Image: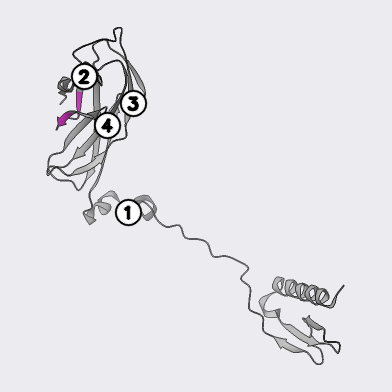
C-alpha cells in the first residue's frame, strides 16, 4: 500500500469512529512521522497536534409541511372568505361525460351547477356546443333540440353581474344516436342554435 493510500485509510477510519462517538469524545490529533507520513489518531501522542473537527448532525429536524387548504390550517370557511377574494367554479352535472343519448329528435337536457364565494349580484351563463353559443342567460340548465347524430362537445362559462367571466367548466363530450342521419334544418355542425330553451 502506498503512503498516500495508507494515510487516506487511517484518516477515514478515525473520522468514522469519531463521528459515530458522542460529540463530547470527538477529538482528532495529527502527527507527522520522520518519513513525512501524516497520521491522524484519536489518542494524544508526543509530537501530535490537536485538529479541530466540526460536529456532524446525525438527526434531521422534521420537515414542516406547508398548509395548502383551510383543513391544514384549521381555518373555517367563514374565516377563509373574510379576505374578500372571489372564488368560483362551475361544472356540467348532466349529461355525464361521454354519455350516449338516443334521440331521433336530437333532444338533450343539459344542467350545470355553480359554486361561488364573495360574488355579489346575479349570475349568468353561456352554454357552448361545438364552439358555438347555444344559450345565454340566468338559467341553470337548458334543453337542446335538433342536435345531429354523432359527437358533440359542451362547455359552460360563468359570469358575474358586470359581465366578467368567473369560471369555465370542463368539456363534456356526448354522443347522439339517431335512426336518421339527414336533417336539412340543422347547420353544418349539427347544432340548431335556436333550439335551446332555458330551464328554471
Q: Which residue is mark 2?
A: 187
Q: CA distance from mark 4 to mark 1?
A: 33 Å
User: Is 49 displayed left or right of 177 in the figure?
Assistant: right
Q: Secondary structure at mark 3?
A: strand
Q: Which residue is mark 4?
A: 155
Q: Residue at x 22, y 43 (%)?
A: 166
Q: Residue at x 81, y 89 (%)?
A: 45
Q: Are marks 3 and 2 in contact (CB under 8 Å)?
A: no
Q: CA distance from mark 3 to mark 1?
A: 37 Å
The mark that comes first in sequence, 2 or 4, is 4
The mark that comes first in sequence, 3 or 1, is 1
Q: Nearer the viewer, residue 5 or 200?
A: 5
Residue 124 versus residue 104 in the image, above or below: below
Q: Are marks 4 and 1 in contact (CB under 8 Å)?
A: no
Q: Which residue is mark 1?
A: 75
Q: Residues within 10 Å of mark 4 (few under 14, many from 20)?
A: many
In the rendered structure, which segment of residues is drawn in magenta?
Answer: 135-142
Q: Residues within 10 Å of mark 1 (few under 14, many from 20)?
A: few
Q: Nearer the viewer, residue 194 or 166?
A: 194
Camera-near label (3 vs 2) is 2
Residue 36 versus residue 167 in the image, above or below: below
Q: Secondary structure at mark 4?
A: strand
Q: CA distance from mark 4 to mark 3?
A: 9 Å
Camera-near label (4 vs 1) is 4
Camera-near label (3 vs 1) is 3
Q: Residue at x 24, y 52 (%)?
A: 81
Amino acid at each position: 500500500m502506498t503512503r498516500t493510500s495508507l494515510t487516506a485509510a487511517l484518516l477515514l477510519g478515525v473520522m468514522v469512529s469519531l463521528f459515530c462517538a458522542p460529540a463530547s469524545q470527538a477529538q482528532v490529533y495529527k502527527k507527522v512521522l520522520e518519513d513525512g507520513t501524516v497520521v491522524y489518531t484519536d489518542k494524544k501522542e508526543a509530537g501530535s497536534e490537536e485538529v479541530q473537527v466540526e460536529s456532524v448532525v446525525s438527526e434531521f429536524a422534521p420537515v414542516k409541511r406547508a398548509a395548502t387548504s383551510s383543513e391544514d390550517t384549521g381555518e373555517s370557511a367563514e374565516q377563509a372568505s373574510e379576505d374578500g377574494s372571489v372564488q368560483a367554479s362551475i361544472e356540467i352535472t348532466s349529461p355525464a361525460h361521454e354519455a350516449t343519448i338516443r334521440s331521433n329528435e336530437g333532444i338533450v337536457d343539459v344542467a350545470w351547477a355553480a359554486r361561488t364565494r364573495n360574488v355579489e349580484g346575479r349570475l349568468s351563463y353561456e352554454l357552448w356546443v361545438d364552439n358555438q353559443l347555444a344559450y345565454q342567460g340566468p338559467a341553470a340548465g337548458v334543453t337542446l333540440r335538433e342536435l345531429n347524430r354523432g359527437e358533440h362537445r359542451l362547455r359552460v362559462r360563468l359570469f358575474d353581474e358586470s359581465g366578467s367571466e368567473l369560471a369555465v367548466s370542463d368539456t363534456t363530450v356526448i354522443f347522439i344516436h339517431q335512426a336518421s342521419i339527414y336533417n336539412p334544418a340543422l347547420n353544418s355542425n349539427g347544432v340548431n342554435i335556436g333550439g335551446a330553451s332555458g330551464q328554471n
